[in-house]
Each structure stands twice: as structure tokens, then as C-alpha cells.
Amino acid sequence: MDNIKQSYFLVVGLGSSGLSMARFLHSKGQKVVATDIDASRTPAGKALKALGIQTQIGFHDQTTFNLARTIVVSPGVPLDMIYLKTAARKGVPIKGDLDIFSQYNKTPVIAITGTNGKTTTTTLVRDMLEASGLTTFMGGNIGTPLVEYLMDDRQADWIVAEISSFQLDLAHNFKPEVGLLLNVAQDHLDRYATFDSYIESKWGIFQNQTSHDKAIINQAIEGFETRITQISSQVFSFSSRPNSNNPQIKDQIKNQIKDRLNVRISGDHVFIRNQDGLEDIDTRALTELPGIHNRENIAAASLANLAAGGNMQGILSALAAFKNLPHRMAFVRTLNGICFYNDSKATNTDAVVRALESFQKNIILILGGKEKGTDFSQLSSWVKKATKQIIAMGEASDHIQEKLGEICPVLQVTSMEEAVKRAYEIGCEGEVVLLSPACASFDMYENYGARGDDFIAQVNKLENKLAAGIKNGE
């Protein structure tokens, strides 16, 4: 390439997001170069080359980075990569998928972020709006890249988008009409230098909103009372705790939080205040959405639905029809009175706490996976209160033993098969075996879904062995 700036967009990372972005920019008549250092992306590269897109697979070329008109970074690519940092020093603009999407999108957006509950809440919002008679496109971090909507002839009333902190890190212009912040807990400390920088990323979902937009925020988030005074949009809250009694800022909160549309959680009930009065949703009948964390998800989704023009009937219909998403507190089966639950999606300690809250006691907890700076000591109080035995596996096994071994017995194993077998041997009738790892899965599995599938397979395999043993009179 010549040593002058070229007219191409460089797309870095060819997972589903990068592939869609390369295709989208190409469809807009832009010259595109796509690169991924992972040689296994060769088939993806071939598909792009067939469209006339230049690719560099299995390596990165600093010159290609330096001469790009704009670099578009896929969410999973670390921003401290030397190729990006060098190009940025040379003045090359670095963008993310949200800003490219925003540049072309004309449809209003509901954007959902948070450490936990994003996918469940995003799905609930979609279902509630559809049940209210509105059309939607659901995408983002949930699976379908947002630019796919821009390449689709179909027009929706609302885009419902799950948004990760990785996407928000490069979202300088992204502005959702309705933004949701569900919760913030320690996670991804292998990517962020400090927890504070992760917090800033999450709150960034509101940074470009105006007084015409809406922010829906969990009042239990630390710093809520101060943070909302720095937001320009209309703030609506949901919470399972009382309103603040801080006299210095109580009036500011009252002025900014609109009393006409708020949600409070009390026990098993979600109370929604809207223009028609107070609605009471009894969640005890919603067996697919167990636990306080799901009551918070229901609260947030209900607010988003109403803020976007949906109705109470849409909320109630969607909740009645909802089926729990895979690998999220999902019941597998009971073996001789021991209940097995698959919560493989719990990839941080806060998610594990929420699972432990749901069962309260007599839990055999399967923890572990890939290390990502997890502070397992954050589980200490709940492990002490609710857990009979920890079974640790994967890369984080020694770390779990170190942090939790003094307050609960820890058994280290090397496979899911061994974890399930030993959990069953340790368990007694009426107890729970819970896979809730607090870790990513990439040390042993392709993703959390593959990990959860293995857990289910091993439980079913054990059931078959037990049945065979009974039939043989053993």
C-alpha cells in the first residue's frame, strides 16, 4: 500500500459483528478491508472476498492499520492492542459498531445494558412491545448485529438492542431514545484496568441523551442518587429498596424521577405506577422467571414497554407466555430427590449471588472456568450462608480454593462429568446441585452454552446409569 491515507474502512475482528459490519459498509459503496489475527476465520474471509472485500486473515499488518480512513473495531477486540494504539497515535479515527449504526439508523432504539440480566430483559421488552401491537427488531449483543437491520427491507416501530460495555467503550455518538441500566457489578476486570472504568462504560449509555429521551435505572445501583443529576434525559426508576432519605439530594431526585411512571418490588410483587394508577403483578405464577433478579428484569422491561408506547395488557400477555432462556437458572432434572439446575450464563460473582438467593440453603455449587480477574471473596457471605459444598473446576480452580476454602469445603475436579458425579454423591434428598460458575467458559468450552449443554448431558448420562443400575438390581 502507498504511504498515504487510503479511502478504506478497516474492520478489525471477523466474528458475527465484524462480518456484518464489513458487509454493511460494502453495501453502502465504501471500500472495506477486513482483518482478523485468528487463522480459523479463513472461511469468513473467503465469504467477504467473494463480495470484493479485501481481507487479511491470520495476521495483522500495522501499515494497513496506519493508512486506513477509519478503523471499525468489533466489540470483542481489546482496545489496548498495539496495532490500534499505534494507528490512533497517527491520527486514524477508531470507531465501534454503535456509532456506525447510529450514523445510518432512523428507527427509535431501546438499549439495554447491565452486568447481568441483559438478554432476559431485552427479550421481555421485545415480547411486551409485540404483545402491545408494536413491531420490533431485536439485536445487538444478544446475537444479531444491529447493522443487519439496516440491510433488511423490513421497518420496525422500535429497535430493541442488548448493549455490552465493550460496545459502549467506543460509542461516542450513540443515543438511544430509551436507555436501560439494569445493574453494575464487578466483571471483565481482565479487560478494564479498574472497576471504576467498567462503571463509567456502563453509565455511558446515557451520555448523549437529551431531555426528550428516557433513562430507566435500577435505584439500587451504587451512586444512583448522584449519577442521575448528571443525566439530561428523563429518569425513571425501578427498585426493590425504599427511596433515598439523603436530605441533600432527595429533592433533586424527586424532581427528576417522574412519579407517574415508576416500579417498586415488594416480596413476590412488582408494582407499576402509570397514568391509570397502580398495577400489581404477582410473580409467584411466573415459574419461568424465578428470583429477585428476574423481578428486577420484569420491572425494567415493563418500564421500557410503557415508555415506548406499549400497554399493561402487553406486559401481562408477554409475561404469561415467557419461557426461560437456556442456561439461566434452568431446571434440568431431579435424581433421587436432588435437583440439578443449569445457570451456566452466570459468568460473574453477582450473577452467582442472585442464583444463591433463589435457593437460600443446602446448595452444592459448581464454580470455575476461565480467570478474568474475578474476586471470589465477594461470594463469601452467601457461600457461608447457603452452600454445603463447592466443586471447583477449570482454570480458576486453585483461586477458588484459596479464596473460599476456609469457609466451605472445596473439591477440585478436572471435568464436568466428574463434577456432576461427585455432586450427586455428596448431595442428599431435598438439596440442590447448581452450576453457576462465576467465570467465562473459554478455558474448556467454546462458550457458556456449550458448558451448560455439557452439564445437562452429564446429568442425563448419570440418570441413565442410575436407571440401568436399578434395573440390574445394583
Image (cartoon, rainbow, N blue to C red):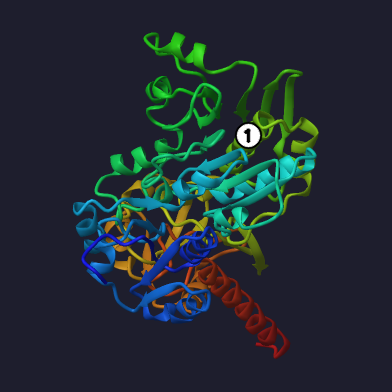
Q: Position of residue 114 (x, y in %)?
A: 47, 43
Residue 440 or 268: which is nearer the viewer?
Answer: 440
Quadrant (top left, top right, bottom left, bottom right) of the C terminus = bottom right
Q: Residue at x 51, y 59 (%)?
A: 345
Q: Is residue 393 visible?
A: no
Q: Position of residue 151 (x, y in %)?
A: 61, 57
Depicted 108 relative to depicted 272: above or below: below
- Identify the residue position indicated by label 1 in the image: 304
Apparent side of residue 333 relative to residue 59 in the rendered image (left or right): right
Apparent side of residue 403 relative to residue 301 in the rendered image (left or right): left
Q: Residue at x 38, y 49 (%)?
A: 379
Apparent side of residue 236 relative to residue 90 in the rendered image (left or right): right
Depicted 3 relative to depicted 215: above or below: below
Residue 197 or 330: which is nearer the viewer?
Answer: 197
Residue 238 or 464: which is nearer the viewer?
Answer: 238
Residue 60 or 461: which is nearer the viewer?
Answer: 60
Q: Position of residue 415 (x, y in %)?
A: 44, 78
Q: Position of residue 293 (x, y in %)?
A: 56, 42
Answer few, some or many: residues within 10 Å of disc 1's Cα (few below 14, many 20 plus, some between 14 and 19). many
Q: Secondary structure at mark 1?
A: helix
Quarter of the figure with residue 456? bottom right
